[in-house]
Image: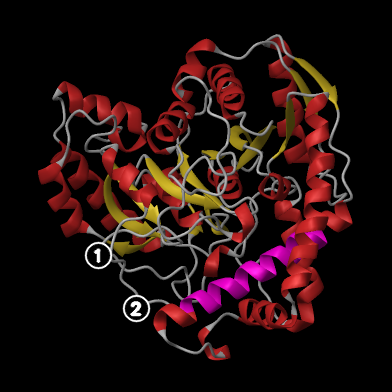
Amino acid sequence: MSELAFLDATAQAALVRSGELRPAELLEHALARIDRLNPELNAVVTRLDESAARSLEALDSSAPFAGVPFLLKDLVADAAGTPRSDGSAFVAGRYVAAGDSELVRRFRRAGLVVVGKTNTSEFGLLPTTEPECFGPTVNPWNPRLGSGGSSGGSAAAVAAGLVAAAHASDGGGSIRVPASCCGLVGLKPTRGRNSYAPQLGDVAGGILCDHVVTRSVRDSAALLDATSGPVPGDPSVPPPNGRPFVQELQRGPRRLRIGLGTVALTGAAAHAECAAAATAAARVLEDLGHEVVEASPEVASEQLFKSFGQVMTGYLGWCIRHWSRALRREPAEADFEAVTWRMYQHSLEQSSADYLLAWQGLQACCRDFARFFERCDVWLTPTLVVPPAPLGYFAYHHEIRMQHIEHLGHYTGFTLVANASGHPAISLPLHWSEEGLPIGVQLTGRFGGEGVLLGLAGQLEQAVPWAHRRPPLAAA
């Protein structure tokens, strides 16, 4: 049982299918780890022990992940009868979902047992998980550090062995950033791969997308097989892969041309440890038979980040207006964090024409970004410009506004362009710093190209395995 916490979801499901473990034993094990480790981690903000136990009664034993405990991020996704806060005091304690969103329904259909909901930054805005509403989630590799965000609660929970996989969402790096900080696999799928039905068509014009954080590449692929596919009326429908994603790991990719970049689109050079992680991965890829060249997309970076900020300002305005209408409650400054309230005030000054002009600028940058994939199959970079940051790194008040913006750029300089363009990208835990901290490496692929990324990620996982690594807090 001591090793059970660090088996991936595929292995846990296999134990259930073989009869070596009962689903009730898996659930008991997960809840016991939450009891023991969550007081320090603060990864799980809502416990669902009773509903998890009830769900075992209707479990389909033929489902691919039958009986595997699972956590939902407390943002956007609805689970029937479950409270949702989106990380905000404005919403917390005032909303209970009437039904499952389509993605949650598909998680359940795959046999996953939802045991709780995880911490997130307020409305998922920041690449850290330190909401005033619930307090910070710490990094299980070093509790003085943040777990990344906005899916930091999910990432910390998986890294510490509370569950083998957890739901996550990504609006600028919010799957890949915490995966990098916590030593996990984090795939941001192609825009529209997982549906936001029935409540939503898209979020922020398609910038946000949902998937999972996992220990293994095979889990990420198999869970994408379980959840992906359009619902009638979805605004974005990416091209089908043509075969199950998990089969890409068995086939492996053809010889690829891979562009290596260690300077972010902000112009910031990666920290030495982060650059070393990407260059080491490049050498492994060359040994595997791929061609690696120094190359990065050429985009108007100032326009990219300015336009992205305006679109996200519109997103935040929508969030608050949506909840104000749903809860029949007028927003007030005391209900929000300072950075959220300031951004909301900007959203009130921004017109609908400003929002569409921002998207026009963003799409021009995305055309330049897409042209990169006419000469390279994959863009290889560090996931982050800097190693995992300390708690408080993204603290905000008016006097340090420019420092706050600079820190945001450090964490999203390699990640947010894929949200703007809709391309898939995956962070892999291929490197550890001298201090023993995980450093993620990112692979970004063509639109609709998750299959290539997963096949390449599977090769790297075999060449540079990470399954044996354990964070100190998980052994506490």
Q: On the image, numbered disc 1 is attached to which residue?
A: 81
Could you say where residue 102 lies in the image, as x and y percent from the top left?
Answer: 37, 50
Could you say where residue 2 lies in the image, as x and y percent from the top left?
Answer: 27, 35
Query: Mark number for residue 93?
Result: 2
Secondary element at tag 2? loop
Could you say where residue 31 lies in the image, as x and y percent from the top left?
Answer: 24, 51
- Report the amino acid beneath label 1: Gly
| Residue 308 lies within the magenta run | yes
Q: Note whether residue 407 is visible.
A: no
Q: Which residues are magenta?
A: 305-323
In the depicted view, which residue is nearer to us: 237 or 3? 237
Q: Is residue 18 left or right of residue 455?
A: left
Q: Would you place residue 418 above or below residue 255 in this image?
A: below
In the depicted view, which residue is nearer to us: 96 or 293? 96
- Report the amino acid beneath label 2: Gly
Q: Is residue 302 left or right of residue 456?
A: right
Residue at image point 36% right, 60% down: 78
